[in-house]
Amino acid sequence: MKVPLEWLGEWSQWKGSPEELAEKLTQSGTEVVAIHSTGCQVRGIVSAKILEKKPHPNADRLSVCVVDDGTGSRQVVCGAKNHQAGDIVPLAKPGTVFQDGMIIKSAKLRGENSEGMLCSSKELGLAEDSEGLLILPPATALGLPLEKLFPGEVVIEVEITSNRPDLASIFGLARELSALGVPLKEKEAVPAADQGELKNWKVSSQDSKLCPHYTLTGLEVKAGIDSPDWMKKRLVAAGLRSLGLLVDVTNYVLLETGQPVHVFDATRVQGSALEVRKAKAGESVTGLDGGKHTLTPNDLVVADGKGVVALAGIVGGADSAVQPTTQKVLLEVASFDAGTVRRAARRLSINTESSKRFARGGLDPELVERARSRVVQLLQDAGALEKYLGLCSVGAAGNLKVEPVPLRWEKAEKMLGYKMDREDLTQRLGSLGFYEEKGGWVAPSWRRDVREEIDLFEELVRLSDLSKVPTSLDSLVDGESGEDREDQLRRQIRTFLVERGYFEVLSGALVRSDEAGSARLTLSAGPDAAGYRQSLLPNLSRAAGRNISRGLMDLKLFELGRVSVEGGREEMRLVLLVSGRERPVHWQEPEVDADRFSLQGIWHELGKRFPGLGQPLTLKEMSPTEKKSVGVKSTIWMAEGKVSVAKARLTPFTSVSSYPGIQRDMALVLPEKVSFADVEKAIRAVAPAEMESLVVFDRFVDASGKKVPKGFLSLGCRLQFRSSARTLTEEEVGGWEKAILQSLASRCEAKLRTVL
């Protein structure tokens, strides 16, 4: 949300710099993502009068103008079409530097001298788009800097989290600052609008849960009255366009209070009654957003005697919209169910200021009457309200019964790790609208997100001086949770795989409805997000296809994420993918392709390190059909398995011995049919604990049978012995070597190569 500081200053007594304000809000959990200025963004541009305009002799689309900025006339070539002699326009003289780095210079354009540039509002940073020069008022003095005509103001851009609808308004932010030590300004209360009955009109609600409170106020206004300049300026600074007084007032009240409001042209509404109901099958509405929306029975609408006039809480209908000539107005201010608004807005891909606030939920029900009264007041102040016709409503704001939330200061201090200033924090909670009752704290109607003690702890820490909060908290205050263990396991698996050359892929859990094995969603988030994945393999395959198409043939990829399984449950899965070469090319060793053994090997390592990872559910080579679907031809191997919650096995620490080791090399001759696994078993069966390592350094087969008999092979084994307590002697190592040779002879028919 864009917040003009001048507007915020009407409610808050903040006196510091924008940067200090951004720091204060961000430290309390309301992130300020940007600070920027409105108004003319280019220095040195002045107002000038067009004395003469004539066509360019060598270019049909250009004109040659003679302009005067009060210091003398000069010639400027211009490409715009909306200006005439006598107009006052912005002039950028030679030497002017624009925000994109462009420098204005004297030059010849198609043979005509041009000493400067005439500017549009877009080039000055006053608008996102424009179709010609900015035409200034005729009374504008010549040579006046544009930054004085359009001084602008500082705007901060605030990121509002989904659980804090109370912050999505100017007043809400001012109230938040009051809890951070910045007092609210004393303002006159908005006079309550008349509660007299609106005759000849009726409103009704089909479901009080979906629309607990709906008000309709009749007003007669003067046509043709424009919005005051101060209102236009604030709306533009907040990112909205001025669309006429009636619409501007509704937008202004929405931004100021956080409560969406809407106006209908009473003469364009069919009949004399409005009903809030579920849409009928096949109904549609053309919205003010320009789209025609087909509705479902799950959508909540406002309907007149003919059909739908608004999609409740989201967008009004074009057929009942106010016009510049509108004189009879119906003002709608209501409360709508957050879930219903959110689902409809998402399904129809409509994102309005109204839908964003209703969809968050938790709007203060008392805002309905406050916003209604504020609209009436602003229309009166603008001199547009001729007659107040009355009010008809259904439901009421209602008083939600909120139980006090217990607050144990000792537990909060133990959990958060620092001593709190209880008196100061009690005062700050009061500034946010909380009050003590029955040994606990009652949250105000605009803070429905605070329902448990841990929610109050969150308020305390964000209202405190964060420099006092220790960087490392005691995670065992309430014990380690299952979520903690799951998160720790996932982090360890990721680290393990990355250290072995794998790259992580992150993909969305929502997929197309025709995705093989996907669970179809009741409410789709879009054409490419209509199902919930039941396997990680398809997304990882597509990621491999994208990489291979860009020339990355040697791949080691993994993804760790949740999938839907039978019974509507979620399950954590790990999927691995290899393609191309096992290792980078090196001149000392041949190229080795990655294959199923690459996956089996790494999965075996994972299983030894993480007991929660069993055998893979799937280990396969990508089929020709699958390869065609992702656009690859190379061989790809994939494995997918379930990840259960279990602590990783810790590798025991063994200190390096300070005593020297003794090495023995054995050149064995044994039948070719004997595997090294059998040789290793035979050696380890009798080897002492002091045998530190066993490696094969040579394997030789002589086809001629001269050096090694046919059917036999020569195997070079290196054994390393070392004790952590003493220096070994040649005699004891010789005894171990003799026992090992006897075991090899009996188990593997092996002999020393010199003894044939």
Image (cartoon, grey):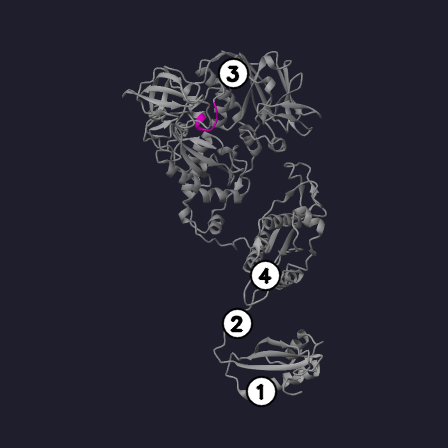
Q: Residue 734 carries which label?
A: 1
The residue nearer to you, when weighing 120 against 323, is 120
Q: At which x and y percent is residue 474?
A: 49, 54
Q: Upstream in the sequence, badge 2 or badge 1? A: 2
Q: Gap between marks 1 and 3, in whole Å?
A: 108 Å
Q: Which of marks 1 and 3 is in front?
A: 1
Q: Which of marks 2 and 3 is in front?
A: 2
Q: Gap between marks 4 and 3, in whole Å?
A: 69 Å
For label 4, the residue is 648
Q: Gap between marks 2 and 1, in whole Å?
A: 26 Å
SS state under label 3: loop
Q: Residue 654 carries which label?
A: 2
SS state under label 2: loop
Q: Upstream in the sequence, badge 1 or badge 3? A: 3
Tell whether 102 sits left or right of 639: left
Q: Nearer the viewer, mark 2 or mark 1?
A: 1
Magenta-highlighted residues? 236-241
Q: How would you rate the neighbour count of disc 1 (Cα within 10 Å): few for under 14, some for 14-19, many for 20 or more? A: few
Q: Gap between marks 2 and 4, in whole Å?
A: 18 Å
Task: Give, as a three-letter code, the residue at label 2.
Answer: Thr
Q: Quadrant of the image for the C terminus?
A: bottom right
The residue nearer to you, when weighing 80 against 446, is 80
**Above or below for 437 versus 614:** above
Q: Which mark is residue 194?
A: 3
Tell whether 671 sits left or right of 380: right
Q: Gap between marks 2 and 3, in whole Å?
A: 84 Å
Task: Give, as a three-letter code, the residue at label 1.
Answer: Gly
Is 140 in the magenta?
A: no
Q: Residue at x 55, y 32 (%)?
A: 356
Q: At which x and y percent is residue 404?
A: 53, 38
Q: Residue at x 60, y 81 (%)?
A: 688
